């Protein structure tokens, strides 16, 4: 029986492409749901179906928040999700976008735990997605990204 070769990456950081795409897809899918792009409320596999139902859920997972703050939280979370998704897809400031994603998803998970119980957060894999964000932030290279295309400006030669 032949020995199995260990898995090696030909290009450092190639796994980050999958992490970036998976996190971005999760954010964009959730945003699409709250704007009814996956269908109306009550359709199969639709969590909210519209923004008012999403804001109701936002209040549920932020039981500490006074009612006037709930729309601010809902819109802020939505803006952050879109911003992080675009940055991750483009690979722009990837480390910062990944760190922000990890923190945002951790906050979602903690809010879900406080508002609906730990099982909801675990079933939605929010903590796993948060860990993916933190792992991505710790990566050493981001191939196929705008970050990888950045070229350092030449420094003036001290002898000239």
Image (cartoon, helix red, strand yellow):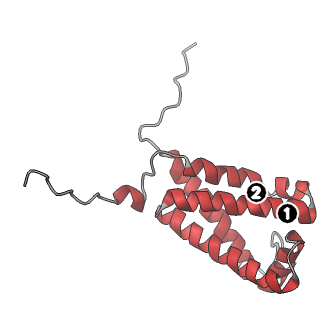
Q: Secondary structure at mark 1?
A: helix
Q: In the rendered structure, which disc, 2 or 1, sits on the residue that comes first in sequence?
A: 1
* Left or right: 100, with 126 as reference point: left
Point 68% across, 69% down: residue = 29
Residue under label 2: 126
Residue 14 in view (yes/no): yes
Q: Residues within 10 Å of mark 2 (few under 14, many from 20)?
A: many
Above or below: residue 1 compared with residue 65: above
Q: Are marks 2 and 1 in contact (CB under 8 Å)?
A: yes
Task: Work out which residue is located at the far top of the displayed protein and give it.
Answer: 1
Q: Pinpoint residue 105: horizontal percent, then vertical percent.
A: 71, 60
131 or 26, which lies in front?
A: 131
Q: Pinpoint residue 158: horizontal percent, then vertical percent.
A: 13, 52
Residue under label 1: 112
What is the C-alpha distance between the residues marked 2 and 1? 9 Å
81 or 50, which lies in front?
A: 81
Residue 135, numbered label? none
* Left or right: 59, with 81 as reference point: right
């Amino acid at each position: 029986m032949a020995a199995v070769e260990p898995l090696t990456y030909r290009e450092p950081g190639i796994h980050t492409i999958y992490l970036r795409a998976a996190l971005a897809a999760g954010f964009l899918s959730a945003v699409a749901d709250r704007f009814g792009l996956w269908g109306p409320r009550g359709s199969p596999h639709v969590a909210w179906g519209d923004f008012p139902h999403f804001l109701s859920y936002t209040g549920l997972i932020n039981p500490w928040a006074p009612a006037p703050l709930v729309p601010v939280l809902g819109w802020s979370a939505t803006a952050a999700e879109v911003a992080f998704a675009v940055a991750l897809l483009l690979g722009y400031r990837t480390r910062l976008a990944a760190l922000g994603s990890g923190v945002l998803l951790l906050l979602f998970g903690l809010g879900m735990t406080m508002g609906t119980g730990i099982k909801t957060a675990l079933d939605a894999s929010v903590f796993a997605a948060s860990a993916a964000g933190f792992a991505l932030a710790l990566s050493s290279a981001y191939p196929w990204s705008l970050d990888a295309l950045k070229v350092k400006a030449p420094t003036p030669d001290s002898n000239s």
